Amino acid sequence: MALTRKYIPHESLRGRRRILPESNYGSLTQMADELPPVVYFMRDRDGLVKIGHTTNLAVRRRAFGSGWGHILAIIPGSREDERAMHARFAKHLAHDREYFHPAPELIAYINTLREALGVPPLRS
């Protein structure tokens, strides 16, 4: 199913205007597969949040195989945007450079993104 042409404005971390397509269905994963490069927030099997970047989420998911969790939120973005997210949430770093504890600050940010996408908020 294709994305609608209606758009939701979203402020990036650096103050530039970003545009997030509004979905006419509830699947963030399907939506992300149809977007240009994205920064994604994914919960892994251990409950940690991975903040990553990809130009093709479908291929990225296959590369993770059975270790892939589910998409919590997505925003159009570059590697620079991904690094900005890593820096923003660095105090919640779990292990590796892309995995973070699901701290209230991080979950609140993800819920802001989810709200803009019309997706119900996470509980924690």
Image: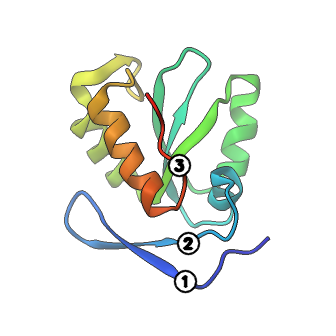
Q: Secondary structure at mark 1?
A: loop
In the image, farthest residue toward the right = 1
* Circle 1/circle 3 CB separation < 8 Å: no
Decide: few, some or many residues near mark 1? Use Cα within 10 Å; few <14, some 14-19, many ≥20: few
> Does residue 94 sit above or below 117 in this rendering?
above
How far across and down, in percent of the image, does residue 58 sit? 72, 50
Disc 1 or disc 3, which is closer to the eye? 3
Closer to the camera in the image, 29 or 104: 104
Closer to the camera in the image, 37 or 11: 11
Q: Amino acid at mark 1?
A: Lys
Q: Relative to residue 111, is residue 28 drawn left or right?
A: right
Q: Secondary structure at mark 3?
A: loop
Give the residue at x 76% y 24%.
66
Q: For the residues marked 1 and 3, what is the alpha-carbon distance in whole angstroms?
A: 19 Å
Give the residue at x 30% y 29%.
104
Decide: few, some or many residues near mark 3? Use Cα within 10 Å; few <14, some 14-19, many ≥20: few
Quadrant containing the C terminus is: top left
* Of the image marks 1 and 3, the number of the one nearer the N terminus: 1
How far across and down, in percent of the image, does residue 85 sit? 31, 43
* Circle 1/circle 2 CB separation < 8 Å: yes
Mark on residue 22? 2
Mark on residue 6? 1
Q: Amino acid at mark 3?
A: Pro
Q: Secondary structure at mark 2?
A: loop
Give the residue at x 44% y 75%.
8
* Of the image marks 3 and 2, the number of the one nearer the N terminus: 2
Mark on residue 120? 3
